Image (cartoon, helix red, strand yellow):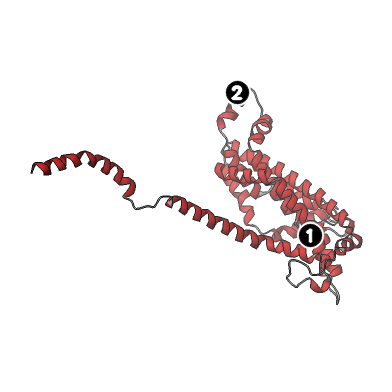
Amino acid sequence: MTQLTTAQETRAPRRPTEEASAPERAPGRRPGGRDRVGLRARLVRVLALTAASVVFLYPFFWLLSASVKPSEDVFDNALIPHVWQLSNYTAIWHAVPLLTWVGNSVTVTLAAAVAVTASSAVVAFGFAYFRFPGRNVLFALVVGTMMLPAVVTMVPQYLIWNQLHLASTQVPLWAPNLFGSAFYIFLLRQFFLGLPRELFEAARVDGAGYRTLFWRIAVPLCRPALIVTFIFEVQASWTDLIRPLIYLRDPSLYTVPRGLKAVLDQFGAGGEMHWEVVCAASVIVTVPMIIAFFVCQRHFTEGIATTGSKG
């Protein structure tokens, strides 16, 4: 008995140490298990993003490959051409005034983007800052115009521009943006509502007018949202085909989409279809949008993230 008691007393002081160290081994998790799970999750995300990138980039790579192929090899689905025919690009430059069309698109696109960004910002600031009877009803009517199909207003708009003797000019392509856009007004209003109203009240106490409130406080704080609005409209105006088809008659006034339609009619009609020339023209007019996206990518992502948090 004495020896047993002595043995128990000898082992007794070790129990707290064993119990303290037991939870570290008790859960049954192997060392580095959490790291392996995190590594697998990252690997799955990388694979998913890679697959999505391939799906979205494949059409452009196919177009780029088809633009340097002979006519008989355009639809062989080979990304690396068997025969390279770079003369397709020189053929399109000599066949149509592509540079003039690009210049027209740049002019119309910048005018439309600047007009809709400025006008929508002014209207959105008015809805966000001022408190007046019927404000919510009026804003609901503005937002409700987004439910109206654009096709419904095409004929009335054409009649208006025709009465103003501007139906055959580039003015109808950008001038309607001077009255704002319901979508952009909604987007910017949500952003303006997220700004602290104390800033405007303090500026009013210091004697600032409404114009100062807008240009000195609201616009600098809402720059990411304004950049997003500008980029959205640049993309929409650059790729717009419906309005140029309705209004433009003179080839010297064609924009890029209207010019591409002319290229398709010229090289895609008849018995022999020169799709390689059409693909070359499509590449030339697509590259500027890709460059614009990469240049404005930081502002674009910042504006989307900030607008989402403010809204």
Name the element at disc 2. Answer: helix
| Residue 205, numbered label | 2
* Residue 250 in view here: no
Q: Position of residue 280 (x, y in %)?
A: 82, 62
Farthest bottom residue in view: 271
User: What residue did someone put label 1 on?
Assistant: 283
Q: Residue at x 81, y 49 (%)?
A: 106
Report the front residue among 235 and 177.
Answer: 235
Q: Position of residue 310 (x, y in %)?
A: 56, 41
Q: Residue at x 37, y 52 (%)?
A: 29
Q: Position of residue 209 (x, y in %)?
A: 66, 28
Would you say 20 lies left or right of 184 here? left
The amino acid type of the residue labelled 1 equals Val
Report the front residue among 294 and 264.
Answer: 294
> Looking at the image, how many numbered discs can be counted on the residues?
2
- Disc 2 to disc 1, how far (Cα)? 56 Å
Of the two numbered discs 2 and 1 in the rendering, the one whose residue sits closer to the viewer: 1
Farthest right residue in view: 94
Of callouts 2 and 1, the N-terminal one: 2
Circle 1: is it few (<14), some (14-19), or many (20+) Cα within 10 Å? Answer: some
* Residue 247 in view here: yes
Q: Residue at x 61, y 26 (%)?
A: 204
